[in-house]
Amino acid sequence: MASVDVGNIRNVVLLSHSGAGKTSLSEAMIFNAKHVTRLGRIEDGNTVSDFEPEEVKRSSSVQTTLIACEADGYKVNFLDTPGYDDFQGEVTAALRVVESSMILLAAPSGVDVGTERAWNMSTDHGLPRMFLVNKMDRENADFDRCVSEIQAAFGNQCVAFQIPIGNAQDFKGVVSVIHPPADVPAEVADQMEAARERLIEAVAETDDALADRYLEGEELTNQEVEEAVRAGILSGNLVPIVAASSTDNVGVEECMALVREFFPSPKDGVKPELATGGDGFEADPNGPLAAFVFKTTADPFVGKLSVFRVYRGVIKSNSEVWNSGRETAERIGQLYLPRGKSQENVTEVSAGDIGAIGKLSDTLTGDTLCLREQPVSFEAIDFPVGFYRVAVSPATKADLDKMSTSLARIVEEDPTLRYSRDPDTAESLISGLGDAQIDVAMDKIRRKFGADLKVKMPKVAYKETITQTIKSEYRHKKQSGGHGQYGHVIIRLEPMERTTGFEFGTEVVGGKVPREYFPSVEKGVMKAMDEGVLAGFPMVDMKAVLCDGSFHDVDSSGMSFEIAGNQAMRKGVADAGPILLEPIMKLHVTVPDAYTGEVMSDLNGKRAKILGMTPHDGTTEIEAEVPQGAVQRYSQDLRSVSQGRGVYRLEFDHYEPLPPDQQPRVIEEAKRAKEEEKV
Ligand SMILES: Nc1nc2c(ncn2[C@@H]2O[C@H](COP(=O)(O)OP(=O)(O)OP(=O)(O)O)[C@@H](O)[C@H]2O)c(=O)[nH]1
Ligand SMILES: [Mg+2]
């Protein structure tokens, strides 16, 4: 298809709680635009948008998919985002490249936490919004109740632009309030009059001059109303509410018509934030290229696929562009327009539009592609940071080889995932936003790279130390014909302050242990530090001082003194009041005030020490110290006590003695872990 005039492009993000019907709506839209000949269904796993096996398996989106609908000279690019919390990163990226947002709610359930979040995020990005009350065909669907809930939650600038005809199984269609048909169906005639009045009133309120004329009883012309609606939507002073049944494809065409007529094109919508190269610019196809990569997927066959939005100029197949952030040229091969599983080859993607390129060598999500002579760079995407961690390990030896490369690729795909190694526990860790995200990542790694990885809770990096100063003596003596072995040491063990690590000292007088053996004694002592006596955790925060001993002219050797030092240490630690230390995390939780009590009582059950509670406009920030072992699954715990409304941050803070009543549990767990490792 020939490229569409930038004024006829719309980029719209679909947002909602999981399951409100974004993917089903996308399906109806793309079907109506005749890009597919069959209306797919979530239940049949055959929608265009949820095409990845991980999505079919879960009957739920796990990534943002471009649903480009070209018809009647318009191109409407819907970005179908996943509603589930763990995939927020996908939403964050999508919000960056659109001019408007469509927030879905399910008619039977009304406004929920996902609606609130969608509203807040759209507002934060300065996006014009509309509400689509979906599932109008369902029992208990109540459009009017949804409208009231929306107005109560978000204000009276939200107004019904349509009246549904019939409800639940009788839902037959919608009638436009902004363009009432010549013959309004009799069953909604009364409603129409009232709805029309409310709409005109809301429109008038967006503009002082209009408001004056309206109050004086003057009729506003259709053209005036339409222009005011367009301006009101753009400024956020008017938020349309429409009704549909996506699965029955009712109301969907009308919704599309509204988007085309009243929502901003890239020419009028929010301007992109530039980090360098000026402060925003027009969506001019004739200007120098400026494109932003907002998504990267790893494909086992095609290789890397980068999805980008062009803001200015044109990007052409078989050309060269400049990656300004990495200061490197990139060769553009074939350009695509992705449509679910399939991809349409295109020769160019022009200002305002979205497309994809395969096999860029250095470009990652968040990068800017432009001309070398006129470089610009867009602000990076501020992805949410995940604090949910799991340890990954290969299922078999063969998987070990593929583990680190496949993890690196999957992290490229999902910037909210991080891959690291814990030096204390020697585990490979992945952190993300929650368990579903990690599950999906493991499924993808298995499917795309053939690596089978297992995940489990990471080990908690407990440590051991001592609490008393004692002296410990060990004499290593062996006579086995010929040369014997002899090393004799007395070492003093002293506890030290937290985080001071380990120190080795010598206070030997009169050469009782010759200087040449000091390093051997130290080596033996150090080896004993690797594994404490209580549960085998590394020892810290103590000092060992070699203060006395004896040697033998012929039989003493480095090895003998190493053994003596090691044994003296082991014996000594057991007598020096050994204890376990546990890592303590600093936790920040922010929840709406209504959930503060629940969150606090959950934290009390986690041995948390509350450091402070700060109220902000309707929310409370709780700061606490909690043992790491108690918050390994905090993403799930907080979700359940705050009904998904809480957010949190976690960072390591310090080590503290483990309370004695916890000690048997930790020792038992360590023992079990050791045994498991053996098999
Ligand atoms: N009756 C009815 N069911 C619908 C409608 N729209 C969606 N559904 C069903 O609701 C379920 C969820 O629909 P999806 O389209 O996957 O919802 P989603 O918003 O994309 O969900 P996530 O991808 O998880 O965020 C599926 O079983 C759909 O068949 C509708 O208008 N009417
Ligand atoms: Mg979906």
Image (spheres, helix red, strand yellow):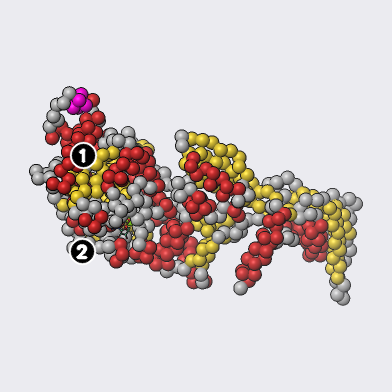
Dot 2 falls on a residue whose secondary structure is loop
Residue 235 horizontal/vertical position (percent) = 27, 34
Q: Earlier in the sequence, mark 2 or mark 1?
A: 2
Label 2 CB less than 8 angstroms from ligand 1: no
Label 1 CB less than 8 angstroms from ligand 1: no
Residue 31 horizontal/vertical position (percent) = 20, 58
Q: Mark 1: few, some, or many residues within 10 Å (few <14, many ≥20)? A: many
Which labelled disc corresponds to residue 58? none
The answer to whether one can see residue 517 in this image is no
Which labelled disc corresponds to residue 38? 2
User: Which residue is pictured at 24% across the width and 46% down the height?
Assistant: 242
Q: Quadrant of the C terminus?
A: bottom right
Residue 233 horizontal/vertical position (percent) = 25, 37
Q: Quadrant of the N terminus?
A: bottom left
Q: Give the camera-side residue of 100 and 24.
A: 24
The answer to whether one can see residue 473 in this image is yes
Instruction: Judge from the rendering whether residue 167 lies leftward or rightward of residue 605; answer left or right.
Output: left
Foreground mark, 2 or 1?
1
Callout 2, which amino acid?
A: Arg
Q: Give the camera-side residue of 301 and 165.
A: 165
**Which quarter of the picture shows residue 304?**
bottom left
**Residue extent of the magenta highlight:** 210-215
Evaluate if marks 2 and 1 touch, with contact meaning CB atoms under 8 Å apart. no
Residue lying furthest left in this view?
A: 182
Circle 1 residue: 195
